[in-house]
Amino acid sequence: DTAVSQTPKYLVTQMGNDKSIKCEQNLGHDTMYWYKQDSKKFLKIMFSYNNKELIINETVPNRFSPKSPDKAHLNLHINSLELGDSAVYFCASSQLSLAETYNEQFFGPGTRLTVL
Amino acid sequence: GNSVTQMEGPVTLSEEAFLTINCTYTATGYPSLFWYVQYPGEGLQLLLKATKADDKGSNKGFEATYRKETTSFHLEKGSVQVSDSAVYFCALSDRMASGSRLTFGEGTQLTVNP
């Protein structure tokens, strides 16, 4: 199936650990995103990559480091995990088109991170 | 900066009731507007969209009209079903030359009882 996929779906870990979340899209898109959804369901963009280049970098602690090895993948590595990092992380992708008034974003199923 | 404000939830309705979820926005320029839906345990799905003033987006019986004069994009459905129970997010797209950023409202939890 064509889709945006994320692994793992659930991640439970201790404070201070380092963990990674992987995202892959097979939609042929050139732009990928990471969003964070907190416990109150509020969604906020963290990063965006276009053709493997960072184009959006919101105010996120530098413990969070995205990596895009190719256009189809955008991974999120988190160092020294803290309790406040517990959230659901969503990956999304879109195809940039300057001719269109918007570029629809397609979301993955999310990764629920719990830091103990 | 851009922002989106949704009516506070949760909203609980009986099946076949009329639904309105209010959404207002603040933005520079002419954003595109969206409603996304998140079913339990799933990711976000685009429900409907409108890209310019007075456009009406519609899908699965849901409708929303882009009102520039009131900076609003209220979601409506004439007769809700149990299967509509989900969290609904209003969003706007801040489109830049190098990509687009979605700014979301707080989300509104809808529960429809049989």
Image: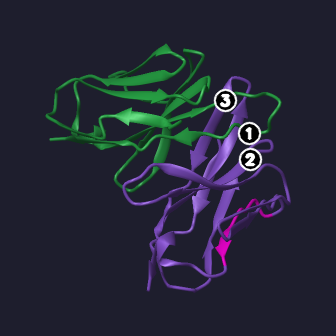
Chain colours: A green, B purple
Query: In which quadrant of the rendered image does the N terminus of chain B lie?
Result: top right
Q: In which quadrant of the rendered image does the C terminus of chain B lie? A: bottom left
Q: Position of residue A109 (x, y in %)?
A: 42, 44
Which label lies toward us, 2 or 3?
Answer: 3
Q: Are marks 2 and 1 in contact (CB under 8 Å)?
A: yes
Q: Secondary structure at mark 3?
A: loop
| Residue under pointer 1 | A102
Mark 3, residues whose alpha carbon is within 10 Å: few (<14), some, or many (≥20)? some
Residue B74 painted magenta: yes
Residue type at the position of mark 3 = Gln
**B91 vs A102: above or below:** below
The structure residue drawn at horizontal position 37% and vertical position 21%, both measured from the top left corner, is: A62
The magenta stretch spans which residues?
B70-77
- Under mark 2, the amino acid is Ser
Q: The residue marked by circle 3 belongs to what chain?
A: A
Residue denoted by label 2: B32
